[in-house]
Amino acid sequence: MLRGDLGAKDSVLHVSGGLDIAIGYEYAGFPTSGKETDHMRIAPLALLPFCLAGCMNVSDMAQGTRYHLSDAGILDHSETRRASNWRLQPDSSIYIAQGHFVPPGNAYPRSNVVAEEAFKGFVEYFPLVQRAPGPLGLDEAWNQATVAGANYILYVRFAAADDRIGSYDEWNSQRAVDRLGVDSSVIQLMVFETGTRYLVDAARIRSRGGILSIYDARPEDLLRPPLDEYARHLLGLSR
């Protein structure tokens, strides 16, 4: 969409849409100095980013920028690995429950925090979603889901949590240089059919905080965005 024709006398920058930007290097009878010529040679290159930006919409640019900042560790980042590409219908009834497992370490998250955050994300995409009031074993979750008439069970577990020092109070309580840094978390998810007990999907979500969100953050603060994304994936939505 951009084409430059460089000659001895002039340069023409052709931009898609019929716009031609002509920059003269030397006109008959009006020679230019070497410095002016160098500036004129650089001018088309300076215009390239603005011309290329016109070929992208704002949402794509914002999405790409956020991805690269997350990958570089500036913003929060998460990675989801799924065992299958199973999709659910929007009218599916889902019962969300969290296991009793407590992640090792000193993070001490709320006992039902993954189920709570999953419910907040899933209810935006699945109207018929319910949540267990507290942690349940898998058999207990099945019984509760059957009574509730749910088609599927989303059974979650907080597998790992690392709460690093990110505030002055935390530094005073721990005083360990090796504990400075960003928080991280790992959660595991399993989706079962209630009637057949068939495992239709399993996923692992690993998240880490970004530098910009390091202050006074906790591992459970990283849960909501990837759970929202997982709900969209179950519906077959890209965003």
Image (tube, rainbow, N blue to C red):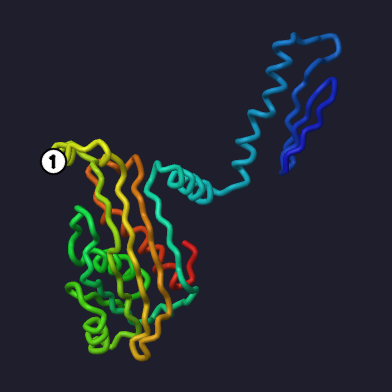
Residue at the extreme bottom: 195
The number of callouts visible is 1
Q: Which residue is at a point 21% across and 71% down the rendered structure image?
A: 100
How far from the left and from the top, in percent, is residue 139? 24, 84
Residue 82 sits in quarter? bottom left
Q: Where is residue 76 in the image (x, y as percent from the top left)?
A: 37, 48
- Is residue 82 shown left or right of residue 169? right
Image height of 193 relative to 8, above or below: below
94 vs 112, left or right, is: right
Q: Nearer the viewer, residue 155 or 100?
A: 100
Residue at x-position 46% and y-position 46%: 71
The answer to whether residue 116 is above or below residue 201 is above
Towards the viewer: 229 or 15? 229
The residue drawn where x is 31% and y is 56% is 185
Residue of label 1 = 173
Secondary structure at badge 1 equals helix
Taking the spot 24% from the left edge, 50% from the top edge, the residue there is 218
Q: Where is residue 149 in the image (x, y as percent from the top left)?
A: 28, 88
In the picture, measured across the screen, residue 10 lies left or right of residue 235, that is: right
Residue 205 horizontal side relative to residue 134, left or right? right
Type of amino acid at the residue the image marks with label 1: Ser
Nearer to me, 191 or 235: 191
Neighbours of disc 1 within 10 Å: few (<14), some (14-19), many (20+)? few
Quadrant into which the N terminus falls: top right
Q: Quadrant of residue 37?
A: top right
